[in-house]
Image (spheres, rainbow, N blue to C red):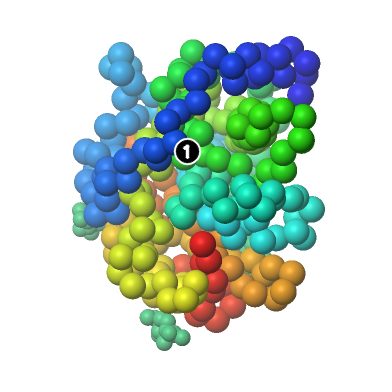
Amino acid sequence: MKPSIFLLLILALITVSPSSSSLHSLSSPSLLSNSSSDLQQFSINEDGTNAAPAPTAGFTNFSLVLQFSKSLCNFPAYNKKCDKKWKEDLPNRFTIHGLWLNFGRNPKPAPPSPRKDIELSKLLNERVLVNKLYNDWLYAYFVPSGNGPKEVDRKTSVWRFWTHEWDNHGVFSQLSTVDYFRNTDNLFDQLGDIYGQFAQLGLIVKGEINVTQASEVLTRELGVKPLMKCLFNSKGDQLLFEIQVTIRKGDLARLHHSQSPLKGHNCTGHMAGLKI
Ligand SMILES: *[C@@H]1O[C@H](CO)[C@@H](O)[C@H](O)[C@H]1NC(C)=O
Ligand SMILES: *[C@@H]1O[C@H](CO)[C@@H](O)[C@H](O)[C@H]1NC(C)=O
Ligand SMILES: *[C@@H]1O[C@H](CO)[C@@H](O)[C@H](O)[C@H]1NC(C)=O
Ligand SMILES: *[C@@H]1O[C@H](CO)[C@@H](O)[C@H](O)[C@H]1NC(C)=O
């Protein structure tokens, strides 16, 4: 990260006041609300202009990628660490990993030049959005540096994560920085509280879930087949850590996933851990 950006981010951490510890309402649109009018609403900006991305060569659909951060904290194979306390603090929810551009078989284009990473600073004016993102788009891995308040450390690390997602995905979207983050958060809100729904339906038993059944439930409730992903931790336990939902570029409608494997998940067998 360039020092100037880093300074801006530090400034952000000071000026964007920490949100109340209450997580944003999870009772908002449930899994069941998938009408196309809902889906299209948030491609329109508040000022009435259409924020749907302009065409980018080869770019077909988005993948909205959600993660279960507590599962990721169990994967030292990634050479990333989680503070023990942070692991406890991670929410019992799927949260945003990113909104990725799915180029299909087309090659990923070169990043726009000049690079637009500096534009992440435009988020700084969006205090309400940023405070919401602290809850919805958090970083799974975090170890405090020990030099200052952990809350500041944690926010610095999440800005690095957002910078990574913007540099690797957002810059290709032809959305402004603010629209990219806002649209991603809106798409996320539309999915409702997936973990809560799994729990409510009794799908999670002793920290395990039948991913085949969970995929069937999600397919019914979202109206499209998502792709669920598992990883093995160092003890050889398989954990569900990711859910991808394909979103059409033009109108942001959901689509069945068409990645390999075509079944609803890439887990081995039916059962996977989903531990809180
Ligand atoms: C998991 O769910 C699938 C699909 O509903 C079912 O066929 C399978 O028997 C279940 N497996 C276990 C171990 O519960
Ligand atoms: C969700 O969308 C699917 C496919 O478009 C449709 O079949 C289903 O009825 C919708 N569900 C609700 C609750 O609107
Ligand atoms: C993505 O978009 C293209 C073109 O619109 C389409 O052919 C493809 O099947 C879509 N679906 C997925 C899941 O990639
Ligand atoms: C599922 O996909 C993830 C991420 O792409 C990969 O790391 C993992 O090994 C896959 N799991 C299985 C069981 O193939």
Residue 99 shows up from this direction: no
**Location of mark 1 (residue):** 135
- Using the image, determine if residue 150 lies above or below residue 231: above
Query: Residue 27, percent across and down?
Result: 27, 46
Q: Residue at x 51, y 34 (%)?
A: 134
Query: Residue 75, percent across and down?
Result: 70, 60
192 relative position to 140: left or right: left
| Residue type, mark 1 in image | Asn
In which of the image's four quarters is ligand 2 placed?
A: bottom left
Q: Residue at x 67, y 70 (%)?
A: 232
Q: Residue at x 45, y 19 (%)?
A: 127
Q: Check disc 1 and report its element: helix, strand or loop.
A: helix
Query: Residue 188, percent across and down?
Result: 40, 42
Instruction: Count residues near mark 1 (Cα–Cα under 10 Å), then give few for <14, some for 14-19, many for 20+.
Output: some
Query: Residue 218, percent across and down?
Result: 36, 63
Examine the image and state in which quarter residue 19 appears.
top left
- Using the image, determine if residue 4 lies above or below residue 185: above
Count of picture labels: 1
Quadrant housing the N terminus:
top right
Q: Pick whichever, 193 or 179, lies toward us.
A: 193
Whether the residue carrying mark 1 lies under 8 Å from ligand 4 is answered with no
Residue 84 shows up from this direction: yes
